[in-house]
Image (spheres, rainbow, N blue to C red):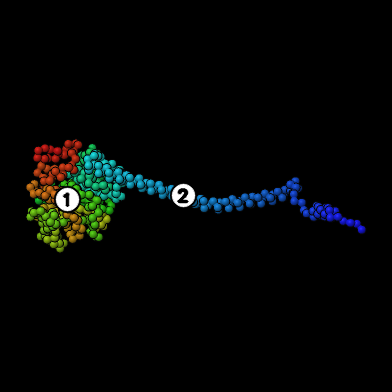
Amino acid sequence: MARFYPTTVLAVLVVLVVLISIFTIPKLKSNPEKLTNKDVQERDVKVNQLIIKDEKEEVKEAEPVKEEEGRKEDVKDDEEVRYRGDKEEVVNNNVEEKEDADEDGSSSSTDGDDKETTYENVINVLVTSDNRTLGGLVAAVNSIYMNTLARVKFYLLVDKVSVSHLKKWIEMTQLKDIDYVLKAFNDSLVENKIVVRDARKDLASPLNFARYYFPVVFPSIEDRLIFIDADSIVQGDIQELWEIPIKQGHAAAFSDDCSSISHRSSVIQTKYMDFLNFKNPTIKALNMSAMACSFNTGVFVVDVTEWKKQRVTRQLDKWLALNTNEELYGTERGGGNSGPPFYIVFYNKYTKMSPAWNVRYLGISPDTRYSDPFVKSAKLLHWNGPYKPWSRTAQHTDDWDKYYISDPTGNFKVVRKYQTI
């Protein structure tokens, strides 16, 4: 009997395992040379499909990144806006500093462009004048410009002979930086409509009635308008007058004549009966009270929308023309001027504004004076009456003189007791 040793058995097993592996396990290596064209095409198609799929997935994964980049760009834009805002604030601060410097006398000029950035809204101011009162217009405009940081647009309406004169006056002096529109008034608007029956024939000037027609002459004016007579100066900030509340349904605000601040003496007329002819049947038919308090039309604030809605210009023009055929006004103690048509149209339909914004009657007499502290505290001084601040006999001329700018052409003369300016 043959004997088997462990080593022999182990060797036999190894041989058997090798033989089985050779004949039963498939080959793992492929031979590239044996791939057919079809195999290659199928492989390429699968590869391309995988590439396309991968690209789509990459796009989807990239979209959040792109959105994030968009957010970063938005943030950048916001930062730029804030920067611009900061930049504007710096400009505004510079303006305030410059204005302070002007008041201290350390700066002689104001940058008009910078000034425009101070307030968002534009304050519309209308001043009218003929060649006789042109120096008054200049002083009025300068007083407004000097005493506010607000952006003001001046609408200047003069007679034809004064257009080139006033333009030179503005462009050749410190007023060259103001924002303004200058026009000649068309006298045909009041032709054959003006009758002045009292002694003051100067009130027959067409420019005295030009305020009626501002929507016709300046149709682009919107929101509000401030009218100021050329014989006035503004000592307060015009922004305050611009912002006064006007009651709903009212087209304008005036200062009434019955307040203690403006009622200086018994020679002042303050009632409707002092201006209108209540014996006239047309006036009687209006059922107005003869004792109603009159108001001054030299300074007023207009709600332009309401003015146009109520067709105030047409109404004023109607009463102005009617007075040429009927004696509606002009022979009463108060005389006849541009005021009476206003009294008819705005009877019980106007808002009262602070009398401090129309301290008047400075031109009513060469003798009677307000106290100096009172004059200094007034927001607006008004030389209504025959004695104008550019004449020799006017009162409180020192308050007017500091705003007057000498005429560079030398045509307008200011007469003083010992000199001519």
Q: Residues within 10 Å of mark 1 (few under 14, many from 20)?
A: some
For the residue pair 12 and 393, the one nearer the viewer reads as 12
Quarter of the image where the N terminus is located? bottom right
In the rendered image, which residue does mark 1 sit on? 378
All told, the count of numbered labels is 2
Asked which quadrant contains residue 109, the reply is top left
Kind of element beneath mark 1: loop
Place of residue 331 in the rendered image (x, y in percent of width and height, measured from the top left):
9, 54
Q: Earlier in the sequence, mark 1 or mark 2?
A: 2
- Establish if 24 lies above or below 395: below
Query: Residue sitting at 72 percent across and 50 percent down?
Result: 39
Query: Which residue sits furthest top?
Result: 409
Q: How far across and down, in percent of the image, does residue 297 sit?
A: 17, 53
Residue 404 in view in this figure:
yes
Residue at 74% x, 47% y: name it.
32
Q: Is the residue under label 2 in contact with that under label 1 (CB below 8 Å)?
A: no
Residue 51 at what x, y percent from top left?
62, 50
Residue 307, image quadrant: bottom left
Q: What residue sits 8% from the left and 46% below the top?
A: 366
Residue drawn at the location 11% of the way across and 37% of the way down: 419
Q: Within 10 angstroms of label 2, few (less than 14), some, or many (20 or more) residues?
A: few
How far is the residue under mark 1 from the one under mark 2?
56 Å
Q: Which residue is labeled 2 in the image?
A: 72
Type of amino acid under label 2: Lys
Q: Can residue 159 be seen?
A: no
* Quadrant of the image containing the C terminus: top left
Name, please, the residue furthest toward the right.
Answer: 1
Looking at the rendered structure, the kind of residue marked 1 is: Ala
Element under disc 2: helix
418 and 72: which is toward the camera: 72
Q: Position of residue 179 (x, y in %)?
A: 27, 44
Residue 161 against residue 384 in the figure, above or below:
above
